[in-house]
Amino acid sequence: MGRSEKPVRNRAVATVLAYLALTKPRVIELLLVTAIPAMLLADRGTVNPLLILNTLVGGMLAAGGANTLNCVADADIDKVMKRTARRPLARAAVPTRSALVFGLVLSVGSFFWLWSTTNLLSGLLAVATIAFYVFVYTLLLKRR
């Protein structure tokens, strides 16, 4: 690899990591860890492993989309808070419009993934959860 390719590769890696940070992967990890035991308890331990996998993928997409949309909505206050000033949108590592599109794609993708691999109710519950988190929690309650 030539010297001129290394900065491009480093920028690409930094961009991917910035988008990943928008999804708040540590929060997603905690949410998904609780999904597996809940599914096993609900079905008395006989859940199809493929159903678990598909539910986890759909949950990751939904949570990642909701978290990204939360970051878009909170970009203005993230810039002024010391704890959040290093988030990707606060430091302009990702364009706001791109983050919005990314969050919407993840959110819509979660609905279609869950609908096609689990059932319609799961997809609709994901949409309802995303809407509640973004509109009720992020835009109404948190800003009071």
Image (cartoon, helix red, strand yellow):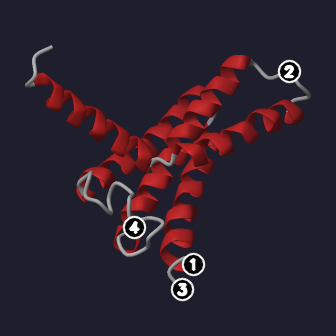
User: Residue placed at 57% from the left, 64% from the top?
Assistant: 132
Check residue 144 in the rendering and tell me which mark sits there, or answer none.
3
- Among numbered discs 3 and 4, the one appearing first in the sequence: 4
Check residue 73 in the rendering and tell me which mark sits there, or answer none.
4
What x and y, as percent, mark residue 83? Answer: 48, 66
What x and y, as percent, mark residue 21? Answer: 43, 46
Frontmost residue, 29 versus 11: 11
- Among numbered discs 2 and 3, the one appearing first in the sequence: 2
Question: Are the residues at dot 3 and dot 4 in contact (C-beta closer than 8 Å)?
Answer: no
Q: CA distance from mark 2 to mark 3?
A: 45 Å
| Residue 39 placement: quadrant | top right
- Among numbered discs 4 and 2, the one appearing first in the sequence: 2
What is the residue that sits farthest to the bottom in this orientation?
144
Q: CA distance from mark 4 to mark 2?
A: 40 Å
Q: Which residue is mark 2?
A: 46
Going by the numbered disc 2, the residue's amino acid type is Thr
Frontmost residue, 94 versus 133: 94
- Among numbered discs 4 and 1, the one appearing first in the sequence: 4
What x and y, as percent, mark residue 67? Answer: 49, 54
Q: Secondary structure at mark 1?
A: helix
